[in-house]
Image (cartoon, coloured by chain):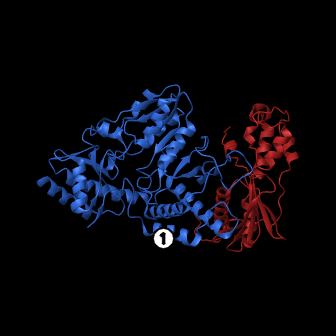
Chain colours: A red, B blue
Amino acid sequence: MEALTIYLRKINIYHTSPCFAEAGKIRVKARLSDDISEIMPYLNRVVKNANYNEHAPNLTMFKEFRMITLEPENLILIKALNDTDARQVLDWLKDLINETAERKTEIEPLYASKKRPHPLQLYTWLPRINCKQCGEKSCLAFAALLSVGQQSLDRCLPLFTDDYQEQKTVMIDLVDALGHDISNYIDGGV
Amino acid sequence: MAVYFDNAATSYPKPEAVYNAVEYFQRQVGVNPGRGTYQKSREADGIIFDTRSALASLFKISDCSRIVFTSNVTESINLALKGYLIKGSHVITTAMEHNAVWRPLKVLEQGGDITLSLLKCPSGMAFNPEELPELIKKNTALVVINHASNVTGTIMPIEKVGKICRAHNIPLLVDAAQTAGVYPVDVQVMHIDLLAFTGHKALLGPAGTGGLYICEGIDLMPLKEGGTGSESLLEMQPAHLPDRFEAGTLNAPGIAGLGAGVKYILEQGVEKIRQHEIDLTEYALLKLKQFPDIVIYGPQDAPSRTGVISFNFTNIAPEEVTYMFDEVYDIMARSGLHCAPQAHRAIETVELNGTVRISFGVFNTQAEIDFLISALEDLANA
């Protein structure tokens, strides 16, 4: 959705290179047409997985498995699949920033740094039976991939059985904090 | 005055912005997208992305990376059919298909790879979607439908087909050569899994452009392998779209022009363009029906068809009519079989050497139709 008042006009890619973090993916650096410092604490509030450092200032966030580090007038996107993917993410980000700016008066800014759930914290609440139904070798491996957005909670089939109801509720909260889309789980899906 | 009534073949003229976009790309950008790390290369990347993104808006596709560029709708259809169908598949299609669908299907059939069933289109009218479930077999792998006939303009009931296909869990491939850009196409509402389109007709782009939308969950084998400017160390094609299906240098100047064409459509609104087409078609049908010696094929009302009208004089061969149009009146129209012998079999015009076909575009006017009608009056009275 296009915001009514354009706060950030453009994100211009100025450097593309292979991703150090993951072979086959790309890393993109871009300049922002407008300084977004003022909006960062608001993004920190609305984006569940965002982490804001007021002193730098910068804000890191995830879009599924991709990581974005925002500075006032620059950004770095890592683990994008290809150029098209990177540009789609940047379009999404531009809209998100403009929509957040548009709704600024309704949002309470958050200046504090948030803690992302640690992979071991995720592991604690998994069934820990290493059933491999998710496609990973162990629940620990699943937890690690879950924490970086490379796995989806609904791939853990035992968790969605009656035996793990409490664990499921906690896990949904944890992946929510990681920024996963939890609408399927809440609506009784899976 | 010169009158162009062959928009079903390719649209002409194009919006001014299309010429400008191609020229701008050639003169001011000029470099290969996706292959370099310099500023102009990134600008080329951005232009390609903008076209992809505009097409996604037009067809209501949420993820534009699911649109891959091809050189035309024929390539898109070949990619969909040959990339998806496996040996032993059964395919349902219609009796009105263009050769772009018909020939690849017949090649696969004659090679013993697939079997075919046809939805009948009596007298060039739309098929009855209620007949579709009766044709479905256990091994039906794909339904392939021409959204609108390039011969009669007949619009097929895609939305109803989409619902039936979805209920039977069979993917739907739509050949939107005649509708993309002039008829609202919504892949969600119509349950379209594979949408093949060309860039140079109603999308108003240059020749040599086209694309295929591939719904998430549908895995195709690429038609070609080669350089993508990404994941170069991989010996196989990259798994991610659009790179998986875009081996080799893209037609970037063409795609730049296509982007300008699609933006023009988005600005005008596809519904408004469709209404203009209905108005012209309605007017032309009304005038043509006043000739006792003219037979009009397919649906007789404008809303059931695109801006394509096939007709014949009962006493003048179609090629004679278009010869006179060209020679005396400077009217550009097509006669013959229009690469769709199947459709001509349905309207029984193969023996007549086909039909005279006129097809309207966004820049045609009622005055041009009046000029055509006066030419036809001359011919009728000759």
Q: Quadrant of residue B378?
A: bottom left
| Amino acid type, label 1 | Asn
Left or right of A175 on screen, residue B349:
left
Q: Quadrant of residue A29?
A: bottom right
Closer to the camera in the image, B111 or B371? B111
Please give the chain letter of the residue carrying mark 1: B
Seen in the picture, residue B360 relative to A15 is either above or below; the reply is: above
Q: Position of residue A93 (x, y in %)?
A: 67, 62
Closer to the camera in the image, B140 or A190? B140
From the image, which quarter does the N terminus of chain A lie in? bottom right
Q: Position of residue A133 (x, y in %)?
A: 77, 33
From the image, which quarter does the C terminus of chain A lie in? top right
- Give the SS element for disc 1: helix
Closer to the camera in the image, B326 or B190? B326
Left or right of A117 on screen, residue B181:
left
Residue topped by disc 1: B20
Q: Residue at x 42, y 56 (%)?
A: B201
Closer to the camera in the image, B75 or B58? B75
Q: Position of residue B345 (x, y in %)?
A: 31, 36
Q: Position of residue A20 (x, y in %)?
A: 81, 57
Q: Residue at x 65, y 65 (%)?
A: A94
Q: Residue at x 54, y 43 (%)?
A: B79
